[in-house]
Image: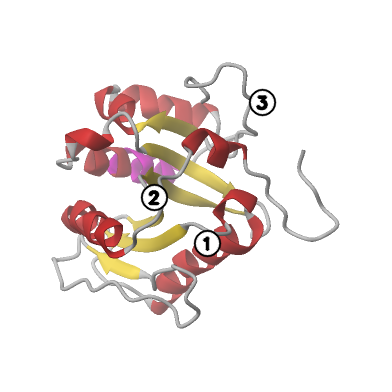
Amino acid sequence: MNADNPHAAPALRRWMVGERLGAFLRADPAAILGTLLQHSGGSVEPTQRNAWARQVEILQALDWPAEWADRARIYFEFSVPRLGRRVDVVLLARHALFVVEFKVGESAFTRHALDQVWDYALDFRHFHEASHAIVIVPVLIATEAAGRAVRIETTAHGDEMARPLAAAPGQLIPLMRDALARFDRPAIDADAWERGRYLPTPTIVEA
């Protein structure tokens, strides 16, 4: 996606689905699921298919701020090569990157799941060139969880990384608003961010 600058170098696609938020919200859920299946690279278990469908359903049903429609970006199944995994959803909104992991059908927030989304956030910070100096907020969503108090806490390093947040689906937008208000940074250039290189070791360079 480089619609704003047709002359920019194409981004190395690390995601299965990536859209402006407004386009995602208008899209047919079946078409989004079809794209995920198309890019999965093999057979997909029914549990994974159902998880994708549920994530899309939840995210499209939220009351997103109208001003985010054309500026925010959403990515599904964002590759984290060093860990050999994919992040469920990455949201780029104004001046922050939200790394979102879903636990579909779960009501509890396990330590393992919180560590998982934290590892993803750290990977972006240390190995994705365009994420070295931006605000990063890891979020764990248990789809059946009841709402709970969510307080944004940062690390002790002054690096503008939030500690992992555990939230019910309906709390995602409020916590995003809180995080954006908490940190005052320049807006992220989404096209430049998409082109950012992933450097898992000093000897491996992505062009």
Disc 3 marks which amino acid? Ala
Residue 118 belongs to the span the image colors magenta: no
Q: Which residue is mark 2?
A: 95
Q: Residues within 10 Å of mark 2 (few under 14, many from 20)?
A: some
Residue 73, by quadrant, is top left
- Secondary structure character of the magenta stretch overall: helix
Q: Residues within 10 Å of mark 3 (few under 14, many from 20)?
A: few
Foreground mark, 1 or 3, reads 3
Instruction: Measure how far apart labels 2 and 1 are at the Cα level.
Output: 18 Å
Instruction: Measure how far apart labels 3 and 2 are at the Cα level.
Output: 22 Å
Q: Residue furthest bottom?
A: 156
Foreground mark, 2 or 1, reads 2
Residue 184, by quadrant, is bottom left
Q: Which residues are magenta?
A: 45-54
| Residue 45: mark | none
Question: Is 158 situated above or below 25?
Answer: below
Q: Which residue is mark 3?
A: 9
Name the residue: 52% across, 61% down: 120
Q: Is residue 122 left or right of residue 84?
A: left
Identify the colour scheme used. secondary structure
> Which is nearer the eye, 124 or 94?
94
On the image, the x and y values in percent for residue 76 come to 44, 41
SS category of the residue bearing label 1 = helix
- Which corner quadrant holds the C terminus? top right
| Residue 120: mark | 1
